[in-house]
Amino acid sequence: MIDFEEEIERFKPSLDVEEVEDAIVKSDLTDMTDIMMELIKERGERDL
């Protein structure tokens, strides 16, 4: 039988997962809202 408590104690997360996690958190992701806000801002500046 698998001793889950023992397995949990020995568990060490993969460094790859932690590195990916850091990269995702630190990345500057532009979504559609950001793009639309930039377009509205540019249009407002042009209309002045």
Image (cartoon, rainbow, N blue to C red):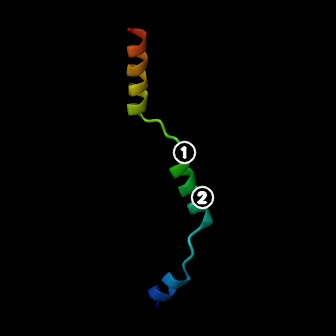
Q: Quadrant of the C terminus?
A: top left
Q: Secondary structure at mark 2?
A: helix
From the viewer's perspective, is residue 16 above or below residue 47? Answer: below
Residue placed most toward the observer, 41 or 31: 41
Q: Earlier in the sequence, mark 1 or mark 2?
A: 2
C-alpha separation, residue under disc 1 versus residue under disc 2: 12 Å
Residue placed most toward the observer, 22 or 14: 22
Who's the residue at 54% across and 49% down the image?
26
Relative image position of residue 13 (x, y in whole percent): 56, 71
From the viewer's perspective, is residue 47 above or below residue 33? Answer: above
Who's the residue at 43% across and 28% down the image?
35
In this view, the residue farthest toward the front is: 48
Label 2 Cα neighbours within 10 Å, binned few <14 / some 14-19 / many ≥20: few
Who's the residue at 60% across and 58% down the image?
19
Residue 12 position by quadrant: bottom right
The amino acid pointed to by label 1 is: Ser
Q: Give the total of numbered labels.
A: 2
Left or right of 34, for residue 26:
right
Q: Secondary structure at mark 1?
A: loop
Which circle marks residue 19 in the picture? Answer: 2
Please give the residue where the numbered disc 1 appears in the rendered image: 27
From the viewer's perspective, is residue 45 above or below residue 6? Answer: above
Who's the residue at 42% across and 10% down the image?
46
